[in-house]
Image: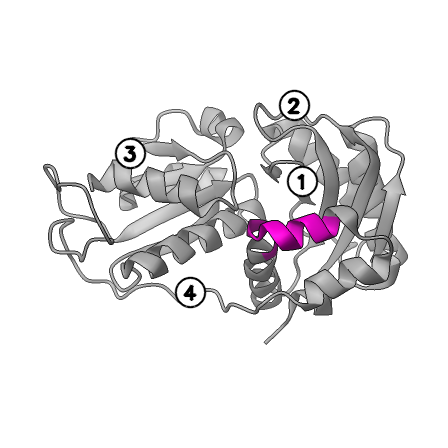
Amino acid sequence: MVRLSDLISVPAIRLEVDAEDWRSAIQHAGALLADVGVAGPSYTQAMVDVVEEHGPYIVITPGFALAHARPDASVTATGLSFVRLAAPVRFGHASNDPVTIVMALTAQDPGAHQQALASLAQVLGDTQKRAALDDAATPEEVLEVFASAPTRAPSTGAPQQQHSAQQRPTPDDPAEVGDTIPSKNLLLTVCGNGLGTSLFLKNTTEQVLDRWGWSPYLSVEATDTISAKGRAKEADFLLTSGAIAQTLGDVGVPVEVIENFSSQEEVDAALRRRYAI
């Protein structure tokens, strides 16, 4: 199993970097990917273009941005870089700005990068580990935090069976169940490319479902905006950022906006609203 620390090395980590704006911050992170030989300059520009097209949805938790794009010809391997800024910059996110840490992701091996993002979600959701990233004095200390991250294999999906919301087990201390309709047994998490932040949100959602005991009843799939528009009616509802929700518009099923993609509490609340528990 690929560990988070397998995809990032000390040369791909820089601390106290000066960036005048969000474009500069992404460019610094992209330059590190080029320095370690996993992507070229064209990929860095693609990461900037994604934000210009879809907005600041890559700012997935307070103070943290995960820059990524679809792999182009310059991408040679799956990898990560880490930039901690000398002064925070604003990406334009309504609740998660300003940003102090920018990581950049290249995704050539689907299995490797899904496992890495699952581990990264657990790091950012752990207040002590996140504080350690903010306080690390050297790149080696940052790498130690990533090396300590537990590995979590992505879910292979739930069996395709038909269950109503009333037939599913309920979480501990549930509210009274209201009117229900048959579930489609599917949730979609959505981002601009279906490769980075949607997988991150998928992992957090799966952790909530695991805790509830609902994983055998619901599959969670990560997808991009174009695919989501075509597949939305296959799902009970979609989970995504505010910026992507605006891009999607009316897709015929509910869309839940999640501000902090590492917050199990926020995802928990969204699931409780939609499943009336």
Residue at the disc numbered 3: 253
Disc nearest the viewer among 3 and 2: 2
Please indicate, yes or no, whether residue 77 appears anywhere in the rendered image. no
- Is residue 127 located in the magenta-colored stretch of the structure? yes
Q: Residue at x 52, y 40 (%)?
A: 191
User: Type of residue at label 2?
Assistant: Gly
Q: Quadrant of residue 84?
A: top right
Q: Earlier in the sequence, mark 3 or mark 4?
A: 4
Query: Dot 2, how many residues are within 10 Å of its Cα: few (below 14), some (14-19), or many (20+)?
Result: some
Q: CA distance from mark 2 to mark 4?
A: 32 Å
Q: Which portion, as a residue range, is magenta?
A: 123-133
Main SS of the magenta part reads: helix
Q: Earlier in the sequence, mark 1 or mark 3?
A: 1
Q: Quadrant of residue 179?
A: top left
Q: CA distance from mark 1 to mark 3?
A: 28 Å
Query: Dot 4, how many residues are within 10 Å of its Cα: few (below 14), some (14-19), or many (20+)?
Result: some
Q: Residue at x 63, y 72 (%)?
A: 2
Q: Earlier in the sequence, mark 2 or mark 1?
A: 1
What's the mark number on residue 119?
Answer: none
129, 268: nearer the viewer: 129
- 114 on left or right of 92: left
Q: Quadrant of residue 38?
A: bottom right
Q: CA distance from mark 4 to mark 1?
A: 24 Å
Residue at the disc numbered 1: 65
Q: CA distance from mark 2 to mark 1?
A: 11 Å
Above-or-below relation of 162 to 182: below
Asked if marks 4 and 1 touch (Cβ < 8 Å), the reply is no
